[in-house]
Amino acid sequence: MAANSEALKRAAAARALEEVESGMRLGLGTGSTANAFIELLGERVRGGLDVRCVPTSEATATLAGQVGITLATLDDLPELDLTVDGADEIGPDLALIKGGGGALLREKIVAAASGAMVVIADNAKLVGTLGRFPLPIEIVPFGAEATRRAVLRLAEAQGLAGEVRLRARDGHVFVTDGGHFILDAGFGAIPDPAALACGLAGIPGVAEHGLFIGLATKAIVAGDGGVQVLTRSANTES
Ligand SMILES: O=C[C@H](O)[C@H](O)[C@H](O)COP(=O)(O)O
């Protein structure tokens, strides 16, 4: 099962490579699926492909450097042609949940600076309604508990319920590349992601949230039956 999932991630990543042209300025996502793309891109770069890439995390920067990809900062390249990234869930209209790896803030900044965002995933990530995956919310450490309670109040006002937990790893609070904390909000189904996104954006202390709405232009989803390409407007291409 796990081996199959890795093969599917690689299949989606390989199809995404077809979107890349020499001379492009690329955003490189974070996570295991993005890593599959970075490794394949590295092979092409070592073969002569000329691209300049902005990483969305320190982990991605490390891997990209190891495979020979030329890196730049978003200040060097404030406008990008294409970002290729993974997702935790892909819902209707290519609305996404991201941030399972804690990279959502940089991922969203990079995606927003890109002319196009291609999401790559195995088909287990496709959902009819977002929310099975707990929503990551990146918060400023100052007043973390007050911010957590504000998130709970917002959820209640929107008819959502569930635990909102401060993310921990190995017994310590998880800290993002930007020095923030993550709340994982287990609301279950989120019927109105846009309303929740709007509410979260209005809470002081919330640095960013993992709802990516209107950012992905295409999703490349691999399943046992092959690779499917979904577009935001038509929702299916081939
Ligand atoms: O913060 C992490 C990112 O949003 C990842 O792209 C997301 O968690 C998906 O990761 P993976 O490809 O490992 O499932």
Image (spheres, rainbow, N blue to C red):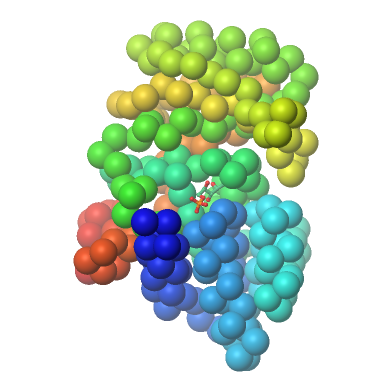
Residue 182 shown left or right of residue 189 in the figure: right
Residue 137 shown left or right of residue 161 in the figure: right
Picture mark count: 0
Rendered position, 24 above or below 169: below
Q: Quadrant of residue 201?
A: top right
> Would residue 229 be visible to someone looking at this image?
no
At 73% from the left and 72% from the top, the residue drawn is 66
Residue 78 drawn at (x, y percent): 67, 59
Task: Identify the residue at the far bottom of this view.
Answer: 47
Of residue 22 and residue 40, the one placed in the foreground of this image is 40
Rendered position, 59 above or below 104: below
Of residue 161 and residue 231, the one placed in the foreground of this image is 161
Residue 236 shown left or right of residue 6 in the figure: left
At 43% from the left and 9% from the top, the residue drawn is 156
Residue 41 shown left or right of residue 52 in the figure: left
Residue 56 drawn at (x, y percent): 65, 54
At 54% from the left and 32% from the top, the residue drawn is 136
Residue 146 drawn at (x, y percent): 67, 10
Q: Please state, as top left, top right, bottom left or bottom right, where the C terminus lies in the image.
A: bottom left
Rendered position, 129 above or below 31: above
